[in-house]
Amino acid sequence: MNDLELLETYGPGASPLRDDVLTRARAELTGQIARESNVTPIADRRPSTGRRIKVALVAAAAAGMVAVLPSMIGLGGTRAVALGPSDPLTFPLTPASLPAGLAAPVFERDLGFVAARYDGAAADAMDITVADEENHWAIPDDARSLDIAGYEGVLFGGTDFGGTTDGHPTLSAVWQDDNGDWVGVTGHGDLADAEVVEELAESLRDRPQHVDLTLTAAPEGWSADRYLSDHHVSYSPDSGEGADDLTVVLLDGPSANFGSDYGAHEVTTEQVQGRTAQVGRAGEGWVLEGRTSAGQPFSVQAPEYFTRAQVLEVAEGVVYRG
């Protein structure tokens, strides 16, 4: 355990400080960083890891001023994070009616869209997609106009190969809602039927659905930008700077040999959600394997500037409702 972790874990509680005290402390500490690193102190630049800066941070923590620069508290003196409560992930729409025989939805998020997929037998499925742009769909010039709950939309067919060479038919209705989002409903296989697609589209309500895989604690200023709710979820900085991710992946089972499977070192055994977990350094980051309180195995992969305690806190808040 390094000196910062020691202070965070066992240090005395601090009395609340006035705003003017915090402002002066912030200015003095950032000035020290600037003098040591010989650069202008900008929030997203990596400060020097020189001994005097480290001493300044320790002194600030000991004086009860950890809150001055929370984003700097972490390993390596780099882009450290502060964890905070994370809102549950949701999908914005709920259908009031669905064709018979469809399973519970699997939710997906990626660049520019969120979607819910309801699978049925064989190639049958229904997709509901909310996208930033109309060009998320390849809408042909001969698409038929239609009215969806008072919105002007289009209806068009296609083919979904789904990783096979045979393919199966699709039929999509797409329109723009009052929020400026583009909404699409697609039927696959035997559900690529105009009546089925239009009925489901007309039944959509602005009622969020909870995504099955989520976190209750995540870095402040980070959001979930990619997920597949029955497999993984990834959080990254809202600023878009860097390529760092915090990723949780559901596993079929635990690793037979955690250390060798991940190339992990500094491995420790911990308690997460009341069950045994293993955590260690791997590559340029952290990796943890544990189980939810319901027994679902999962892994957490985090950047190297997280602390071990933060990785454990993230893992403690992994929720899977599947």
Image: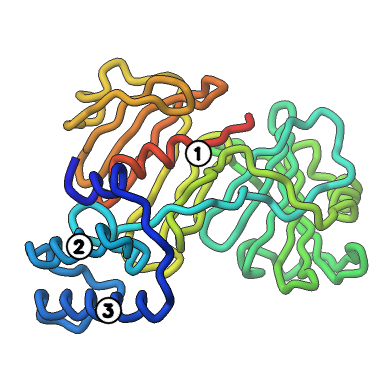
Instruction: From the viewer's perspective, tell me whether residue 98 is left or right of residue 274.
Output: right
Q: Which residue is mark 2?
A: 59
Give the residue type at disc 1.
Gly
Residue 42: assigned label = 3
Mark 2 vs mark 3, CA separation in Å:
21 Å
From mark 1 to mark 2, how far is it between C-alphas? 31 Å
Q: How far is mark 3 from mark 1, CA to CA? A: 32 Å
Circles 3 and 1: CB atoms closer than 8 Å: no
Mark positioned earlier in the residue sequence (1 or 2):
2
| Nearer the camera: disc 1 or disc 2 | 2
- Residue 233's spot in the image, x, y percent? 49, 44
Res 215 visible: yes
Amino acid at pointer 2? Ala
N-terminal of the pair, mark 3 or mark 1, is: 3
87 relative to 47, above or below: above
Q: Where residue 319 appears, x then y in whole percent?
A: 56, 35
